[in-house]
Image (cartoon, grey):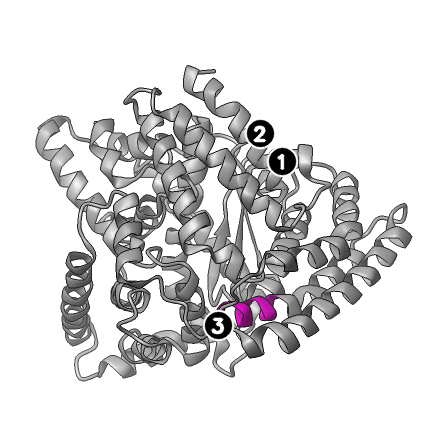
Amino acid sequence: MTDLDALLRPFFDALMELRPVDATYLGIHDHDHRLPEGGREDSEAEGKLLRGLREKLTDAGEGIDAEVARYFTELTLFELEDFRVGDRMAFGGEILGTALFLLFARDFAPAETRMEAILSRLEDAPRYLERSRERLQEPVRVWNQVALESVRELPTLLGEIVAAAPDSLAPRLSRAADAAREAIDDHRRWLEGEVIPSASPEFQIGEAGFERLLQLRRLPAPPDAILRLGREQLSQVHEQRRELVAKHWPGKTVAEVEAAIRSDHAPDFTQALVEYRESIAAARTFVAEKELATIPAGEALHVIETPPFLRATTPFAAYFPAAPFDERQLGVYIVTPLTSSDALQEHNRAAIQNTSVHEAYPGHHLQFVSANAGRTLARVLSSYQAHEFVEGWAHYCEQLMYEEGFSASPEVRFVQLTDLLWRACRIVIDVELSRGRMTFDEAVRMLVEEAGLPREGAVAEVNRYTFTPGYQLSYLYGKQLLLELRERVQARQGSDFRLKGFHDTLLNAGALPAALWDRLF
């Protein structure tokens, strides 16, 4: 254990005591049977912990881990005390769903052991949901509409849990699930009848708040410069896509080519999941054979259907990382079945190949299992915050796999460029929506008209954007920063430069803010 880990350990242990669901997420299973206390005392205790840590870190030196710990502390205090999402959004339903889902989906222990922990959390669910209401002080309408969608879908997860219960626990699990359903229904009525009707329509962090957020993230450019990148990319990528269509589909319009690509999909969602698994396996083999990065031994990735309670904020797909403290490095990749008539078009074969690169190999899954192999407490904490690396890396991988020949078909390239339009829109919307210069409806319309998202997916996207300012810009901006870093390192190393060495150095260092990347080389 390093000196800094020894300094951080009491803080980390106390934080996990306050955040037992986060502990499960990270693979610390001492708290699997617990839910948070839920009331305002949790946020007050977190603030006290963070302020105490800030004081201790003043003399922690200038090493990378010390810088990362200070970065985490300042950002988390800002989110807790300035932006205050937890005081303005009723997170109780989502936290309960995540608490159960992590134990249900990850097989880090025998099924009966995990079911016992689920039972304990289920039995505590009525108390927790009631207490969680105390924290809601200044509700924001759109945030609590999102919370309501999660709550409405929770009973489906409970049904899946009860159906999978071993005989020894089935009676208690059934009773606990029934009581939890009543509490969830009561929570739903509270949101519908008391919270949302009187909630504020205002959600923006504002000009000063957004600028302060980017400063705390130590991003090298101010908001307007990042906004220019988004607008420039939007114009350039539209042109690149038109050129691709003219070259490979002469006489066809962009819309016609897109329709043809989207129509090439599996006959049903079950088969689409099979194709996701096959594409992920092919990407993994390609990364290993081309020596693009080291794949740690023993890692695994499960592909499953998105649980209903997460669908309100996961319009297409998402990845639950392998837990840093779990012995088995298992990631969970969730894919959402949409309800519209053309839902399977969102899971067309070209899109599956590109998304699998982003989420799996060499994207998020490889990113997290590599970081976990050399984890420190500071870097585990920073994985919550360094979005420009987490999302920038996965977006960078899409281009990398195109450059290296895995995603070389014109169909996949078309999808990549279309997704790049989406990421450029995300920059523009993130900067403008967060600062109050764009309305919710204007953001939805931009995603539909510029990026071609279906309205259902666009609404779900913007729902999330409203309470995660600064996150959306991290995809394209982070990718741009990584490409610039690669150029600098290649220029310094000359003929000694190797992609594998460059990638392994980044991946093994964990999720660091961009301000620290050059120090790794």
Circle 2 residues within 10 Å: few <14, some 14–19, many ≥20: few
Three-letter amino acid code of the residue under disc 3: Val
Observer-nearest residue: 151 or 344? 151
Which mark, residue 13? 2
Q: Secondary structure at mark 1?
A: helix
In the picture, measured across the screen, residue 219 lies left or right of residue 512, that is left
> Is 512 contained in the magenta span?
no
Three-letter amino acid code of the residue under disc 2: Asp
Q: Secondary structure at mark 2?
A: helix
Residue 377 lies, with reference to residue 287, above or below; the image says above
Residue 413 appears in the figure: no
The picture places residue 172, in percent across and down from the top left corner, at 88, 51
Circle 1 residues within 10 Å: few <14, some 14–19, many ≥20: some
Q: Earlier in the sequence, mark 3 or mark 1?
A: 1
- By secondary structure, the bulk of the magenta-drawn segment is best described as helix
Which mark, residue 396? none
Which mark, residue 142? 3
Three-letter amino acid code of the residue under disc 1: Glu
Q: Secondary structure at mark 3?
A: helix
Give the residue number, with chain letter if any, for mark 1. 17
Residue 183 lies, with reference to residue 167, above or below; the image says below
The picture places residue 77, in percent across and down from the top left corner, at 42, 43
Observer-nearest residue: 300 or 156? 156
**Residues tagged 2 and 1 counted as in contact (Cβ below 8 A):** yes
In the picture, measured across the screen, residue 464 lies left or right of residue 402, that is right
Observer-nearest residue: 481 or 490? 481
Name which quarter of the figure residue 496 lies in. Answer: top left
Q: Which residues are magenta?
A: 141-150
In the picture, measured across the screen, residue 326 lies left or right of residue 240, that is right
Point 30% across, 38% down: residue: 292
**Residues tagged 2 and 3 counted as in contact (Cβ below 8 A):** no
> Is 148 contained in the magenta span?
yes
